[in-house]
Amino acid sequence: MSLIRKTNYRFLSWFIRNTWKAIGGLEVQGIENFPRHGPCIVIANHQSYLDPLLINAVTPRILHSMAKSTQFSGRFMGWWMPFIYTFPVRRYQTDPQAVRIVLRRLAAGEPVMIYVEGERTWDGRLQPPRLGTIRVLLKAGVPIIPVRIDGAYDVWPRWHRKIRPGRITIRFGPSIRFPRLDSRADREAVLAEARDRIVAALSGPLDHADSEPPDPIG
Amino acid sequence: MAIRDLLYICAECGREGGLKPAENGEVCDRCSTRYTRVDGALIRCEPPGKPERTLHPSEWVDLLARSDGFEVPDRAEPVILRTATTYRPLRIRGEYLGRVEQFGPPEEGTVELTPDALIIRTADRTDHWRLTALTAVQPSSTALQVKLRDGPLLSLKFPQGSALLWEERLRACLQACYSRLGRGTIIEFQPQILCR
């Protein structure tokens, strides 16, 4: 079973990677920043449904990804999503089981993938990271690998049904290290600073835009 | 999903929720301005008799944000409601991963927002949920999900409207309601409504 799962994951990664290279173009930068061994948490901006497919496909190790629980609702997806190393999080209430799974995967030396915004962007810009996610990062105390994906929004924005193939860039940044903070008070004390570091690591060109806003129409 | 999910206000005439599907894009039913997706995610706006304008969605959002704030809508909006009342445990190779919602069948109805309540009417019932009974508000792809204290998770789809608009409306109403009750400023709407 384990071998089948891994083989299936590797084959899918190879297939997705090469398919997108052929139809749209795929550039990967900074892959040397991804640790070859040991636990880490990969955080990324979320531009489209393509992000989890492509980031997982270009990452050299199997990522254990957190995904919204409603995606597991159907019978097939309820089987398939865990099969590809994805676990659910209920986003409308505190979900201690999801945190337990994160810590359990990390304790086993595995990399865990979390989208800190909690949902896809509507307008292409980075949304504020969820405070609960930052608390988990601080509780875990493992290296955090920021991954910036660009181009996926232009290919498939949240508000449109159609995919228009285009070039997508995935950049693995240098790891961020927060000290492991076991007490809630300690985590709350550094929450704002941690959030700012994460935002800085994941920001893209639109997030730094300081140009004049467009003139009103009419 | 469609352009009207993002641009729920016509940038030309300011009509809210007026964009309707048309050939090659969407058209405002008041001023006939046409909106189309062009290169990448750029959106082109073509007002009749005026120069067209093409902007990135982030620019459109900034442009529309300068309009007046959200008002409580004066009419009910058609909605497709799904309710999750039960949960199924999820396991892989014997490992417990968590519980997953089981949604019931979709029900057609309407949703109405008042300063104090969210009212959902379907063919066989009317649910009157006080805003203070809401514990979380979150968008989920094409739907708006609302969690009720000691109650079910509701998933609302807006076949003629925008989930983003309703999310913004509901959040604004909740904030106003909490302010009236002296509960402070809401800093997070999920995983649970959190005030400062």
Image: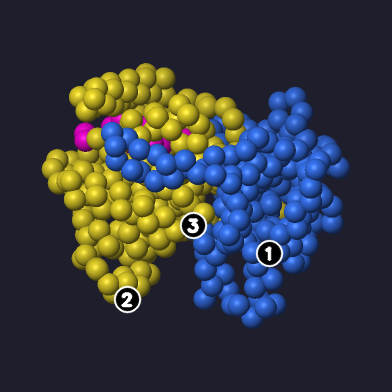
What residue is rendered at 50% in x and 31% in y? A74
Q: Nearer the viewer, residue A183 or A79?
A: A79
Chain at tag 1: B
The residue at the far bottom in this view is: B182
What residue is rendered at 84% in x and 56% in y? B74
Q: Dots 1 and 2: beta carbons under 8 Å?
A: no
Q: CA distance from mark 2 to mark 3?
A: 21 Å
Q: Nearer the viewer, residue A109 or A162?
A: A109
Q: Colour of chain B?
A: blue
Q: Colour of chain A?
A: yellow
Q: What range is drawn magenta here? A: A49-61
Chain at tag 2: A
Residues tagged by mark 3 and mark 1 found on one chain of the structure:
no
How packed mark 2 is, by other alpha carbons closer than 10 Å (few <14, some 14-19, many 20 or more), is few
Mark 3: secondary structure? loop
Q: Nearer the viewer, mark 2 or mark 3?
A: 3
Q: Is residue A99 visible?
A: yes
Determine the main secondary structure of the stretch shown in magenta: helix
Q: Quadrant of residue A4?
A: top left
Locate residue B53, reporting x and y percent. 68, 41
Mark 2: secondary structure? helix
Q: The residue under label 1 is which amino acid type?
A: Leu
Q: Quadrant of residue A94?
A: bottom left
Mark 1: secondary structure? helix
Q: Is residue B130 above or below residue B85?
A: below
Q: The residue under label 2 is which amino acid type?
A: Ala
Mark number displayed over residue A185: 2
Q: Is residue A57 magenta?
A: yes
Label 3 sits on residue? A93
Q: Nearer the viewer, residue B19 or A82?
A: A82
